[in-house]
Amino acid sequence: MKDQYGRAITYLRLSVTELCNLRCRYCMPAGGICKLSHDQLLSEEEMLQAVRTAAQLGITKVRITGGEPLTKPNILSICRGVAQTPGIEDTALTTNGTRLPELAVPLREAGIRRLNISLDTLNADRYASMTRLGRLEDALRGIEAALDAGFERVKINTVLIGGFNEDEVPALADLTRRWPVDVRFIELMPMPGNTEFGPESYIPVDRVLEQLPEAEAEAEDGVARLYRLPGAQGHVGLISPLSREFCGTCNRIRLTADGRLKPCLHSADEISIKGLDAAGMLERMREAILAKPRCHGELSAVSRSQSVRAMNQIGG
Ligand code: SAM
Ligand code: SF4
């Protein structure tokens, strides 16, 4: 289905949980979040009904996210259900990777074709400090497990943060030589809750190119501008929600774990589908697609996202 600005909406981001085994400083408060009760959350059947409804409206691609989707006890059954939905051609998942050593093979078998794994640093102390609870070695073992499990594509997502990992750009980009992966640098977004980051943290991804003079430009891929280092197996990607927004080609809607459709990541608008039958969901999903704004307002350290939710509650 097209929205009122003519954009075909073909991509659903399905958040299956707000919970996470890490507490990344830009995403979640230190103490975690108030756990929603069972009946506030979408059931597995409601999630799958929402995916069937989305497919009826022309959605062909679903990305499962969270919170950390691999902390959800029934994650394999959800993945299987999404991947088997008629009309859904591509099922992908975003994860911090720490549970992939056990789950990579079962996820592949459940029908997940592509994985995005988040990794902001190759320094163990920095990893522990930014994630508050995580160990770098678990994330690296997770990436290796994903590569061994035979996913069609594995991408590494790195949030570029001034004063934190800017000096690691060459080492992180070099992972595209070590492994058949894309490494995509993403600008830090000023979401509610991550106010500990000052203006110096918000740096444009074009700074990445200053540190990679040998990178050659290649085509664009959705929201990412792609480059390749000599001898690399994968691309270096730049995703710039702040410095060059890509709203004109936005093709997605989001569904939160408590059943709110978000027409735009950075808007406060939400439309609930919790408790509705198939016909009710169809009507609300149409409404959500038509409610997509042309663009979100300016984003910067001082002009923050209008979303009332932190990233773990939306599904990044
Ligand atoms: N837990 C999974 C993970 O970390 O990949 C999936 C959910 S997480 C919210 C999805 C992505 O959002 C991660 O790559 C994370 O780095 C990114 N993210 C979270 N908060 C962000 C922010 N304020 N700005 C930019 N990216 C952010
Ligand atoms: Fe958890 Fe992912 Fe948010 Fe980090 S970015 S706290 S891993 S949901």
Image: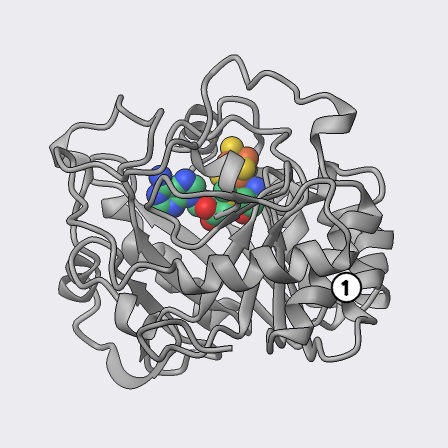
State the count of labels: 1
Mark 1 sits near ligand 1, with its Cβ under 8 Å away: no
205, above or below 2, in the image: above
Residue 257 picture quarter: top right
Q: Position of residue 218 (x, y in %)?
A: 30, 86
Element on which disc 1 rests: helix
Q: Which color scheme did the rendering employ for the protein?
A: one colour
Answer with left or right where residue 298 lies relative to residue 145: left
Identify the residue position indicated by label 1 in the image. 82
Dot 1, how many residues are within 10 Å of its Cα: few (below 14), some (14-19), or many (20+)?
many
The residue under the point 43% across, 55% down is 263
Residue 228 picture quarter: bottom left
Q: Is residue 212 visible?
A: yes
Taking the view exactly as shown, the residue that stands out farthest to the bottom is 219
Q: Position of residue 91 (x, y in %)?
A: 68, 68
The residue under the point 46% across, 33% down is 127
Taking the view exactly as shown, the residue that stands out farthest to the top is 31
Q: Nearer the viewer, residue 158 or 292?
A: 292
Q: Position of residue 312 (x, y in %)?
A: 51, 35
Q: Nearer the viewer, residue 60 or 156?
A: 60
Q: Is residue 105 visible?
A: no
The residue under the point 57% across, 59% down is 285
What type is the residue that disc 1 sits on? Val
89, above or below 161, in the image: below
260, above or below 251, in the image: above
Q: Nearer the viewer, residue 316 or 24?
A: 316
Answer with left or right where residue 99 lies relative to residue 95: right
The residue under the point 59% across, 16% down is 34
Q: Position of residue 72 (x, y in %)?
A: 76, 38
